[in-house]
Amino acid sequence: MLELKNFKEKLNLKIRGIFSKNKIFNLKKTFLKFNKFSDYDQYMKLIKTIKTFKNDKVKEKKVKPTIKSASLIKQFSNSEKYQQLIETIRKFKINKAKRKTENKINTTYLLIKEFFKSNTNKYLFQKLQKLSFFRKQLKIKKEQKSNEKFIQKIGIVFYGDHNLLFLSANIDLNNRMYINGLTEIPIPGNVIGDSMVEDSNELANIALDSINLLDLMDSPLLVILSSSFFNIHTFNSSDLKQISPNDSKVQSKSPYLPGNTLIDFLRMSDNNIPNELVRTIYSKKDFIESWTNTLSIIDLPVIGIIPAAPHIFDAITNKVVESTTILIDIEKTTTTLLVGSNFAQLNSHKLPFGSALYVSNNLNETALNYFERVLNSVKLILKESDESMPENIYVMGNGLDQLIDENFSLPDGFRSISELNLSSYSYLPKKMDIHEVISGSIDSTIESLASIVKSCV
């Protein structure tokens, strides 16, 4: 009986502690009922009941109150409109890879906005777009705001086929290029000949007119010269006595006279290559000096003077993995062929024909002849080097604009670099104050220049 009495006292204290803050229970009636218990097992049942009640109260405290936004999501996610929206976005993602994404910012977000505009009210859309759950599920990214402090304005100069192209462009932190203005000027042979600048003063005056017109007087210039002015060969460093223009093997690969050869070296470094490769670029010394003389007269900061094709070739091999990669740069009178692979051999070949021979009113016949001739040349070169034909031959250059139109696309086995989305740029001629061109189309040229700029700036 003493043990039972002590047990009652302890239980009384426990009941007071649990029930003291709960008004829904009548403490006096509870004790009266408690005193009627005389069996020990009944006390144990009561204790179990009290423990269960206590645990339930703790769980109630841990449960968060219902959030209105969560209720909104649940209500909307069960609706038919939500299911239609998700299905629309799913189909959009499947087709997205097949469509050109140029100049499209937050396309998914805009698609959703258009869906709501036509299917439901704006209030619901405004509510939903604030919810992290909804943004995460539909992968909506906030538009990146450009900071004008970090936008660099540059001038891009491209010369090839006796045409001088000037571009005014802004480059933001995301390496996206916005083309603001453009001029294309024909250059007579007495100003720039086939192999060098004949009149630096006159070329400087022509260039300064475009610089003033495009408001580039305070901007640095990037000078890009067509691929036909350069030759490329790659050596194993162990095959050279010294990495120098004076090395006999280096000189033997130059297509120019030794005294009129300018050579630039680029070491190709990769942990997987046991023998270091050295890419060697050859150009005529007097040709480059004639351009540097012109730029000294213009007297603006110069980012560099570079060939067109090698930078695009590296961009392709960084994106497409193949044992052999082939890039052709089409000009009016010549075609430059680059054969190599990523961090490996890269050699250039000159083909003595360009787009001019194959331009006519019926591109379906004449342009097809051009690509057949290029393909035959590629096969002969690969056969000599014992290399296999890649899945695609990539195409660039201002000559490409003359060979394709809305009625003629590239034949099987050829692929334009525009399909690889190597760069991000905005080119909207109708919105430019200055857009003066003499060519029928320069879209392929713009694509090439944008890809080069991304690699250099």
Image (spheres, rainbow, N blue to C red):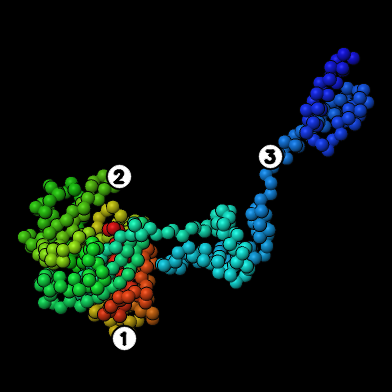
Judged by depth in the image, the label closer to the viewer, 3 or 1, is 3
State if disc 1 and disc 3 touch (CB < 8 Å). no
Element on which disc 1 rests = loop
Element on which disc 2 rests = loop
| Relative height, residue 34 to residue 442 (above, below) | above
Report whether 120 appears left or right of 184: right
State if disc 2 and disc 3 touch (CB < 8 Å). no
| Relative height, residue 256 to residue 444 (above, below) | above
Q: Earlier in the sequence, mark 3 or mark 2?
A: 3
Q: Residue at x 13, y 77 (%)?
A: 189
Q: Residue at x 26, y 69 (%)?
A: 215
State if disc 1 and disc 2 touch (CB < 8 Å). no
* C-alpha span from label 3 to label 2: 56 Å
Reading the image, the residue beneath label 2 is 271
Element on which disc 3 rests = helix
Which residue in the rendered view is the most extreme toward the bottom? 361
Percent x, y of residue 284: 12, 64
Q: Quadrant of residue 129?
A: bottom right
* Amino acid beneath label 1: Asn
* C-alpha span from label 2 to label 1: 52 Å
Percent x, y of residue 405: 35, 79
| Relative height, residue 54 to residue 215 (above, below) | above
* Amino acid beneath label 3: Lys
Reading the image, the residue beneath label 3 is 62
Reading the image, the residue beneath label 1 is 361
**Which residue occupies the foreground of this view, 309 or 298?**
298
